[in-house]
Image (spheres, rainbow, N blue to C red):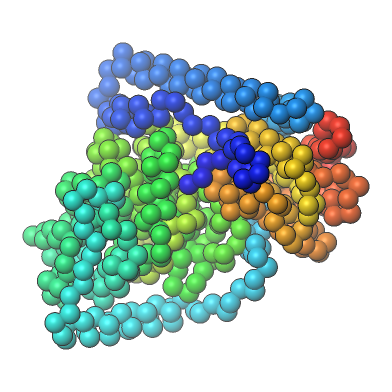
Amino acid sequence: MENAISRDQNGGWIEEAATRMSDAERLVTGRAALAAALVRGSLSAQERARLAKENADAAQRRMVEAEARLADLQVSTSWRLTAPLRMVAHGLRRIISWNRAVLRGGTRAAATRDTEGATARPLQPEDEAKERYRRNCRDALDAFLANDARLALPHSANPRASVVIVLYNQAELTFDCLQSIAREAPPDTEVILLDNASTDATPALLERIDGARVIKAAENLHFLRGVNRAASEARGRHLLLLNNDTTIAANAIKAASDRLDGEPDLGAVGGRVLRLDGTLQEAGCIIWRDGHCEGYGRGEDPRAPAFAFTRDVDYCSGAFLMVRRQVFEALGGLDEVFAPAYFEEADLCMRIRAAGLRVAYEPGAQITHFEYGSVGSSASARPLYVRNHRTFVERHGPTLRSAHMDATRGALAARARTSQPGAVLLLDGEADVGDRRDSLFRDTFASLRLAGAAMTYLRLATADRPGLEEDVLRHSGIEVIRATTLPELRSFLAERRNFYSLVVCSASKHAKPVDEALKAIIDLWPEEEVIMLDMKIDGPINFIEGAA
């Protein structure tokens, strides 16, 4: 993943866009083990005090590093370019002090806007898609078993990622899953298959698989215990929990592995999960204050910009969840109190974050999920959910009450875990802004990212800003929206009412698109406390009268 917002080659420099902790490797190797002991209640009072002091010291170091990075950023440009950064920082401090509870919800309707303006294709009813998919998979499996064909999976003596798949019947779904791994998995991947004493064609299928490590359980260990058993034999740096009723898209495993290798303070990463009817199952998941969970964006168009950028999340489901093996082992794997299944991955992610590591959503890691293919139906899953929800809330109640939102706030407000309240809307209306404005915009982006702000880059033009690649912004955790007409702009602003606390205009407010946007904001957000800043190339940032 690119961690910087980079200038074009003529500029000759790259500005850092996100803080990286200097002691992140120590966090991975040491604090995860301490957190595991803390969760199991085996830390002494002295060790608890030491862990608390380490957390405070690490936070202080991160603050000092962020200040140093910002100082470097300021001295690297002229005074005229650094003055707006100071004003942005001042504006952020005002947000924190004035609008501590500014996020008042919102809907997920805004997620449906397509970045490229493409028309969404008609979607098939999910039950019809499932029936047709299973029939096609069964026909393919029968044809495979009817001859002497074999399926070769990747195998490596030094794997980067170990893929763990737990099987129990559903051989036709497993076959399709393994075919996708054979097509798309990198060569430095190992596959570990644990069969829970299947009684269908699964044993015959496994006899035709080359390259995988096959574990045959004498009885049905179910999902959770099966994962722990298979994970105990993994050799990769990273451990991918993958459901057997999924298929992976190109680069899914590589994208997740790249995130973990590139961000030492990242403990786990999940991907964009699609349902068979083409809609989104989840783009990261939300854990509400009451302990119930929601897949962000369920039922929406997966191509929408709301699901196209990276962000930290509460958790990602075990349909596709890649965890550092070191961390997984230090935390004792999936907790068997949640056996046979449900809430085990949410619990794991909560414990990962308690250890001082992050959990993130990576849109480049995409899979398609049959959903409930391994348990039969959503009805049979419900009793397990109810029981384990009670256990989950009892364990994590204090954290849920202090660090998670009530469901009434809405999924938009809760979709990302950020270090600052409120969100920032970056309003850009120029088609060709030139090098000096480009530098100003890059410095502003970097400053806001260092401050831990959630950002949306709203482009009021059809073309990319020269030198400011939108894909780089998405990889840096910034949502990118395009609104090329006034109706599109007003629709977006109406959908995002009560979400933003700071609006930064990258171009003069006298430019027609920006002027229309500012008028629309004042019109559509009349009762909100929003700070609006106008960035001028020939002067410092000025505060514009807000919508409140």
**Nearer the observer, 154 or 420:** 154
Q: Residue at x 35, y 26 (%)?
A: 26
Q: Quadrant of the C terminus?
A: top right
- Report whether 317 appears left or right of 161: right
Residue furthest toward the left? 218
Residue 312, horizontal then vertical, whole percent: 50, 43
Q: Residue at x 41, y 60 (%)?
A: 251
Is 260 rendered above or below residue 143? Answer: above
**Nearer the observer, 413 or 1:** 1
Residue 416 shows in the view: no
Residue 114, horizontal then vertical, whole percent: 64, 64
- Report whether 313 appears left or right of 493: left
Residue 11 occupies which quadrant of the picture? top right
**Nearer the observer, 230 or 539:** 539
Q: Residue at x 29, y 48 (%)?
A: 160
Residue 331 occupies which quadrant of the picture? top left
Residue 460 shows in the view: yes
